[in-house]
Image (spheres, helix red, strand yellow):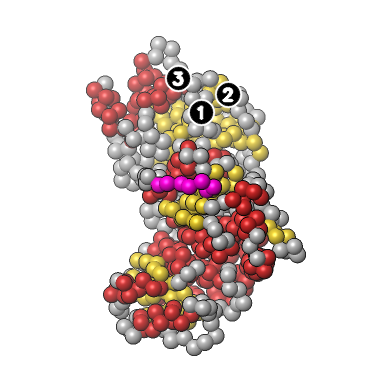
Amino acid sequence: MCGIVGYIGDKRAQEILTSGLRRLEYRGYDSAGIATLNGQGDITLLRKKGKVAELDLAIEKNETGDAVGIGHTRWATHGEPSERNAHPHTVGDITLVHNGIIENYKDLKSVLEDRKYTFQSDTDSEVLAALIDSIYQSQDEKELLGAVAEALDLAVGAYGIAVLTPKQPDQIIVARKGSPLLLGVDEGEVYIGSDASAILGHTDQIIYLKDGEIGRCSRDGVELFDINAQPVEPIIEKLEMDLHAIQKKGYDHFLLKEINEQADTLRSTLAGRINHSEGSVQLGGPGLSSDELRDLKNIIIVGCGTAYYAGQLASYYIEQLTTDVAIQVEIASELRYRSFNVSEHSVALIVSQSGETADTLACLQELKRRGVRTIGVVNAVGSTIAREVDSGIYLHVGAEISVASTKAFTSQVAAMVLFGITIAQAKGTSPQLIQEFIDEIIQLPEQISAVIKTHSGDIKQFASKYKSYEHSLFVGRDTLFPVALEGALKLKEISYIQAEGYASGELKHGPIALIDDRFFEVALLADNWLYDKSASNIAEVNSRGGHILTVTNTTKEVDSESLLRIDTKLEHMLPLLFNVTLQLFAYYVALERGNDVDQPRNLAKSVTVE
Ligand code: M6R
């Protein structure tokens, strides 16, 4: 949530900051701003409501050659999206950008008002800037790092910050607690970013700030201090990502690119983990011994949004692959405040594309505190969750830029299926069943490509047909139920059509009352042992005049207003194939409605606040 950039060196900061902000825009795009500083201590502050493109226009009129600066792209929490609430915030001698939430900002604000501070914005961040300034002004010998550290001691909440002052124009102070921040270092310069994409292309030498750390960035490098103000030696790691990964590669939108590259990204998830001829899976990451896998009795899967739905789908598979493992799939924002119980021989799968989702991270920390072994199912290498879990399975799908998650879902499910197979192997599940799963998952990338190639045209037409409805219902049974939920989420978040996912059998317990001419239904119909039951649900909707788009693999006749027939032999992995069609459907509907498909309103890619 929100993106931070910063730079100190000898290059033109405005250019570096705005190009970084453009790459971070997926984290929030309510407003954007930068502050740059010259050697004489003059600050140029530019802020605009809306996207970075608005800021570019302001910069054209206020170009500077300053080589020090900080910038921010905002996803509003406290205070409406407006120029007044945009970062950076300047109070007295302090200019700051902040990600996260200062929870006690109201208390701090009233103390500061007593000290005659007045506030221009509604943000908690401006209060933090004022707090730092009040401490800074009270120092006999001005020392920015000390003032920031003292202020952060008083602040309750989460933050990633970058702070500068014209009084000490040769440094930027950075700190993090619960909100990611990393530093790129090179000869005579330091880059600051809330994720690696802001730094990509400038340097591959990265320092990941840890929670509680505070740092001074200057042209001489980075000095780091821990929570007790003790110096710590920065650990420099190599950034394993290239610029190519964050480019559209000829597609109109990142979303379409990410849907289309799923065959390849899924191959990367599977690579080196399956021995097809032996019918076995080896996962190095989780680090559980065969005995631990055999004795496993309970799995808690935690995630938010699409990651949560991936967990739901994976739970069906792991249940099929084992006979004595109980699985609970939890929405992170709920679990973190529940007084839940964990039994012995439990492990937790912590599912997150970004590896930064605040609620998921909080669950991870709580589960660890209770002694549960935590295993990350994470895409973003080096992210907070990836660092804090006991062990993990990386997805390796590359950067996912579009706010709507697509390729990550497919690979999250696949990674958890592989984990399920490793448990099944240890527990002595029938090799035939394991082989069936392996055979199917290996075929899946090619089948995904074929479905996209064969059906994009039809799906586009269906999108045009249903684009004007304002309400929709997605239904599926068994493994197609989580896909119905995910399909509905995809449609609603980018098309703004109300879309609800339901288990088909639940229709007559309420939702069927919704059916009328403003409403369409997407029915997921597998030609399996549940076919007749799902077909009956379709008939029930038909007989009430419903408008149905059925996605199916059957060759039987289906009574449905629209029909998308997928020709495939896959059974277990069928839901992942159907899901790709729903991703495309959501994309084309959103496109038809003229929406910004990559940056839908009110959303952000990485949700680092509760
Ligand atoms: O980065 P994460 O996987 O932890 O993100 C979780 C959700 O915020 C995310 O899946 C969200 O629901 C997507 N916008 C859905 O497309």
**Residue at figure coordinates x 40%, y 11% from the top left:** 140
Mark 2 or mark 3: whose residue is earlier in sequence: 3
The residue pinned by badge 3 equals 146
Q: How many marks?
A: 3
For the C terminus, the quadrant is top left
Q: CA distance from mark 3 to mark 1?
A: 13 Å
Q: Looking at the picture, which amino acid does disc 2 mark?
A: Val
Pick whichever, 190 or 438, lies toward us.
Answer: 438
The residue pinned by badge 2 equals 232
Q: Position of residue 2 (x, y in %)?
A: 43, 43
**Residue at figure coordinates x 35%, y 82% from the top left:** 540
Classified by dominant secondary structure, the portion drawn in magenta counts as loop
- Which mark's residue is nearer the viewer, 2 or 3? 2
Whether label 2 touches label 1, CB < 8 Å: yes
Q: Position of residue 227 (x, y in %)?
A: 49, 25
Q: Quick check: 447 above or below 40?
A: below
Mark 3 or mark 1: whose residue is earlier in sequence: 3
